[in-house]
Image (tube, helix red, strand yellow):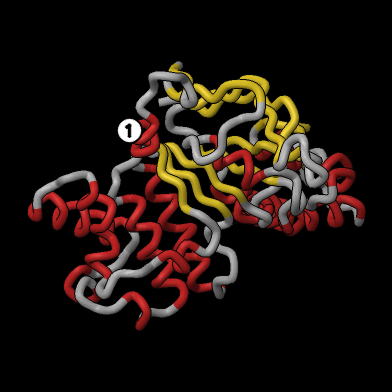
Amino acid sequence: MSIELKQVSHTYSEGSAFQSVALKNISLKIEDGEFVCLVGHTGCGKSTLVQHLNGLLKPTSGQVLVDGEDLNGEHVDRRKLRQRVGLVFQYPEYQLFEETVAKDIGFGPKNLGLDAAQIDARVRRAMERVHMDYNKYAQRSPFELSGGQMRRVAIAGVLAMEPEVLILDEPTAGLDPRGRDRILTMLEELHREGGTIVMVSHSMDDVARLATRVIVLAHGELVMTGTPREIFTRPERMEEIGLGVPDAARLCAELRRRGLDLPEDLYTQAELKEHILRAWKEARRAE
């Protein structure tokens, strides 16, 4: 399943004194099986863009195509298309409302008209995918859980709809390191299962860990797209946009300035560790 944006622009409160241009002629395509990370400074249009991907917002101009079908076409069943593209908002735990975890996760499937056995199967599967034990948590109130657990329940509610594309807006925002790592590990597993994922993030380290492709926005415009290696080997350009690069890429650049012979395109901790150990072993052998 692919999602394509063709010259998409979006203006809030168009024609009023409060008019604000959020997106300007965005053209991009998200292919089946990708893990796309969307980055940019606050206010650059990231959240606006992802809300176009399942039809929550309509373009002021341009088209959003889902498998070649215009999401905002006159005779399109937008409800059915939205089931194929699941969107997890920032701080999704604020939308929890049912008395038990199982009921909250099963709310969407219930609205699809599924029977009790089908709903239960989807709830169990979704809880398994977010690393929550059904027997331990299903009958508990979601409001008795930790912040990270509530976040995973909210994500499970979207996964229970079995979308083909999962979109997440800052899924680790506000979490402690342990909760953050659990979310990232879960997303890695979902991607390995073959899922297509689009994630908005401010953390370049998270992007380096997960992304197969990075899309960079600035002032509502698409300014760069490429693999993490292609993007993070342009630190000067990223700084111009108001963004950084992963800690490993920064450390690599500093070590090079201090004379250590390292490749210029290292951006993950694992790569940097491997090259430093290799350089150290070579230096020991030369002694």
Residue at 66% x, 29% y is 60
> What is the residue that sits farthest to the top in this orientation?
68
On-image quarter of the N terminus: top left
Q: Is residue 269 left or right of residue 194?
A: right
How many numbered marks appear? 1
Q: Is residue 104 left or right of residue 9?
A: left
Quarter of the view holding residue 107: bottom left
Residue at 22% x, 44% y is 112
Viewer-side residue, 72 vs 130: 72
Q: Which residue is mark 1?
A: 80
Q: Is residue 286 visible?
A: no
Where residue 94 sits in the image (x, y, percent)?
A: 47, 68
Quarter of the view holding residue 85: top left
Viewer-side residue, 147 vs 119: 119
On-image quarter of the C terminus: bottom right
Residue at 22% x, 58% y is 123
Where residue 8 sits in the image (x, y, percent)?
A: 65, 26
Determine whether the residue tagged by mark 1 lies in a helix, strand or loop. helix
Viewer-side residue, 196 vs 193: 196
Quarter of the view holding residue 191: top left
Residue at 43% x, 32% y is 33
Q: Is residue 164 left or right of residue 244?
A: left
> What is the residue that sits farthest to the bottom in this orientation?
144
Where residue 88 sits in the image (x, y, percent)?
A: 47, 52
Where residue 71 sits in the image (x, y, percent)?
A: 47, 26
Q: Amino acid at mark 1?
A: Lys
Q: Is residue 257 visible?
A: yes
Q: Residues within 10 Å of mark 1 (few under 14, many from 20)?
A: few
